[in-house]
Amino acid sequence: MCRFSAVQAAASDTSGGHATASEVRSDDSQNLALILETMCGIVGYVGPRPSQDILIAGLARLEYRGYDSAGIAVIDGNGDLGMRKKAGKLSMLRDSLADAPLGDGTTGIGHTRWATHGGPTDVNAHPHLADDDKLAVIHNGIIENFSALREELLASGVEFRSETDTEVAAALLGREYAKSGNLQDAFQNVVNRLEGAFTLLAMHEDHPGLVVGARRNSPLVIGLGEGENFLGSDVAAFVEHTRKALAIGQDQIVSITPSEVTVTDFSGSPVEAEPFDVSWDAAAAEKGGWSSFMAKEVAEQPQAVANTILGRVHDGQVVIPELDGLDELFIGINRVIITACGTASYAALVGKYAIEQWARVATDVELAHEFRYRDPVIGDDTLVISISQSGETMDTLMAVKYARERGARTLSICNTQGATIPRESDAVVYTHAGPEVAVASTKAFSAQITALLLLGLHMGRVRQTLTDDSAVAELADLPDKIASVLEKENDHVAQLAGWMADTRSVLFLGRHVGYPIALEGALKLKEISYIHAEGFAAGELKHGPIALIEPGQPVFVIVPSPRHSALIHSKVVSNIQEIRARGARVIVIAEEGDAAVLPFADEVIHIPLAGPMFEPVLAVVPLQIFAMALATAKGLDVDQPRNLAKSVTVE
Ligand code: M6R
């Protein structure tokens, strides 16, 4: 049975000797060859079972966070620390361990890496060793003062094998440990000297059965087992073993042994970690017979949307229980800003239309990485809504913190329990899409739009601006309508993609809520098929992009239903005629029975009849299938596209 206690470790001030920020920056610019570690997956284990397989299984679930290299370290039955690391995907490490396993040691740490600079090599892979290879360290993030620390260590005779900032932390820890022989004290001293963003795990062969960890602006969660404990970048690392977890706050240190978990702040004062139960089960994070996680996740969209709606509609009205007690806030606000990155920012654009229409409050969408670098007009009458599947996107997290500092109220829409962004927000509405593993976001996007629709309807009810309940009634039908698109259009769209495998550029057009879907369709195609793609507002076409149209240019057009607005529909049909006249190959996504588009379309993909705010969730599905099928036709790995990682935990 696990006991939670907090240890009182000696606080130690080791802050002297830091380089200033500008010194570090100039050092860094002289060291462009140095490898900076950024988004990575981390797992730690202590318990009675051999750790090697547990670590590898955990890394397999975290591989979406980075797949440039992978490595593990294990303390074996004789108390010796063994380590193996390999450049390339996890399979390279697996093969190496199959040839020569690390033994049956029951304490271990593992790492899968995504690097921003420099080549992924065996030597730069984690773990990094110190103290005559008795100490192993893994790390996610960027240690911003590593240059100064490296100089200091070089001057004292330390020799480095790699060019990473992580090895600097390992060497520092080795030096501190040599002073006291106390791993926790040494670790605390070291993390207090580090600047930047980091999750750090360490273990030493003198202390089998102990793994120490710390986090600052980078994720780390604890998994609580029976006679065993886990650490992970997220719960996927250990969900197959336990669904009981503890969230660790910023600037906190954790030690795990098989029977005990202790958490302190960076000065050693005990803190209470927040317990939570993981609602995902291990099977949900497995491929389950699908050719890829992306294929599985596209197919899971009806369920993801249904789960997100579940428990939030009562007596014909949307009531989100997590928002109980916030009525006054919703009534008092004069402005909403939705902030997010990538796909989540396109969901935000749909949310803008819904919130403005139903809750009658001015709503803007801001890319998180732009938001905090200007001087936005926000105050206590502003609600800043952040959207993030992972809940760890650094740009979005920083935007949330910035908004709070400026007095705004913050609400996050997030898919990952225990993640940092919801913990930094005043309120959270979870999407219940289940784990999304493929780098390209699909079911999380549908669930994010659904959550925004729910939020708009909830706010509209509270603000008494919602005049028509038909949208609430329609929510229940949405999962079946998505299922029908999947069923009816999958083969048609996949065939279309097969014909277009040699295409070099694809354009996407949409109006109103079709515009964000055009952007999303283009992003999906770019990121997994490496084909040039652009999304445009259809009305913008004549202001420049129409020059791109030449004979044979494929253009997807998302056509809104004529039942919602004959005017918008007719404008889009005119846009189709304009590009068709210039030779474009037009692929239309339109509602069943829309005869007006037929004379001008080379291909028509049908979606069921739905209310205007619901069409995006249906129209995006064929575009996801198209991108996936085209990437597959090109022989590409749709789950792990080049240069990308699932969760971008650096700015
Ligand atoms: O985890 P988040 O939702 O915060 O991630 C935001 C973006 O990085 C993410 O949506 C990205 O654009 C996807 N790879 C798109 O498929």
Image (cartoon, helix red, strand yellow):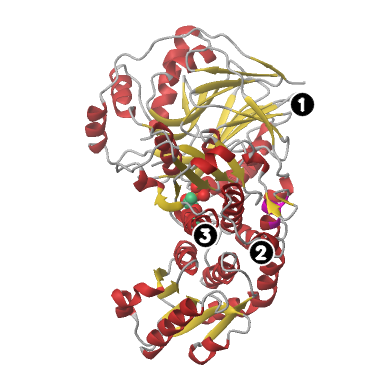
Image quadrant containing the C terminus: top left
Residue at the disc numbered 2: 470
How crowded is the residue under tag 1: few (<14 C-alpha within 10 Å), some, or many (20+)?
A: few
The residue lying furthest to the bottom in this view is 599
* In the depicted structure, whether residue 242 falls above or below residue 99: above
Q: Which residues are magenta?
A: 306-310
Image quadrant containing the N terminus: top right
Q: Position of residue 150 (x, y in %)?
A: 32, 25
Earlier in the chain: of badge 2 and badge 1, it is 1
Nearest the eye: 553 or 639: 553
* Mark 3 and mark 2: Cα distance apart in space: 13 Å
Assess whether residue 307 is covered by the magenta stretch. Answer: yes
Q: Nearer the viewer, mark 2 or mark 1?
A: 2
**Element at label 2:** helix
Q: Is residue 473 left or right of residue 234?
A: right
Which of the numbered marks, if any, corresponds to residue 357?
A: 3
Nearest the eye: 213 or 381: 381
Characterize the magenta stretch by its predominant secondary structure: helix
